Image (cartoon, rainbow, N blue to C red):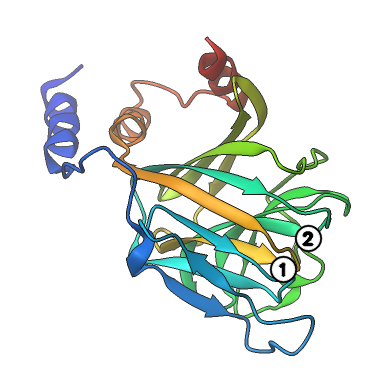
Amino acid sequence: MSKSAYLMVLAILVAIPHVATGAADLSSFEVLRYSDNVQPSAANWVLASDGMSVTQTTNNRPSFFLDPNDAVNLSLEWDARVNSTDDDGFGFVWGWQEFGNFYLFGWGNSVAPSMSVGKAIGGSLDPFFPPGQFDPTPLATSTVHWANNTVYHFLLEFVPGQTVIEITQGSTLVESFLITDTTYSSGRFGFYTHSLGSVTFSNLVPEPNTALLLMGALVALGIARRPTSGERAASILN
């Protein structure tokens, strides 16, 4: 590695702020409901007394539970569980700018594709109808359905231009995505539900994504390449 490359990588590592490991308190998160809350019903986000989890209880119009701060250059992990016989959607958003401008992961239990990663641009409402489907074409899809009363563990890594998503259930990798898109380079993170009640999100742990930032620097310098999604999937199981 040349001296200039070394100094660039060192500068990136020094610039990364320290964030203590531990579950985040969700008390500062903001509830945003889609403007037309007539049918089937408005979302009802119930925060646990300790602030460590939140449950959306109603069969709702699209709604979001958003962190007030930007979430970029971070690794976010959390758990989610559905306790319902319904088959509609839940997930999360990131790169949130405003209603109609964000990235969204939606996961349903009947509509094909049941799992979808996409983006809303310019205020389009199409990503909401039906849940888990997008216009324009999704960035990634999967046919995997969620199972009732099952705890799933989510990982989201977001740096400008790249997003990594991994879902596991116990030690089993359910699905993973490596998304390359430059539409939104920063923005807020939040949980999402649509026409699905009894969804609980918990144990959110945000940490600075040192490894992904370092990889980005090395790739930019031509020193390394980004791992494929298959390689990442293999590493999580080893």
Residue at the farthest front position: 49
Under tag 2, what secondary structure? loop
Examine the rendering and report whether any part of residue 86 can be seen: yes
The percent position of residue 89, horizontal first and vertical second, equals 74, 58
Q: Which residue is mark 2?
A: 133
Q: Which dot marks residue 172? A: none
Q: On the image, numbered disc 1 is attached to which residue?
A: 127
* Furthest residue in direction top, as rendered: 238
Q: Which quarter of the rendering shows the N terminus?
A: top left
- Front-most of 71 and 53? 53
Residue at the (75%, 63%) spot, across then down:
134
Q: Residues within 10 Å of mark 2 (few under 14, many from 20)?
A: many
Q: Is residue 200 above or below residue 236?
A: below
Residue at image location 67% in from the left, 57% down from the top: 90
> Disc 1 or 2, which lies upstream in sequence?
1
- Of 175 and 39, nearer the camera is 39
Q: Position of residue 118 (x, y in %)?
A: 66, 57
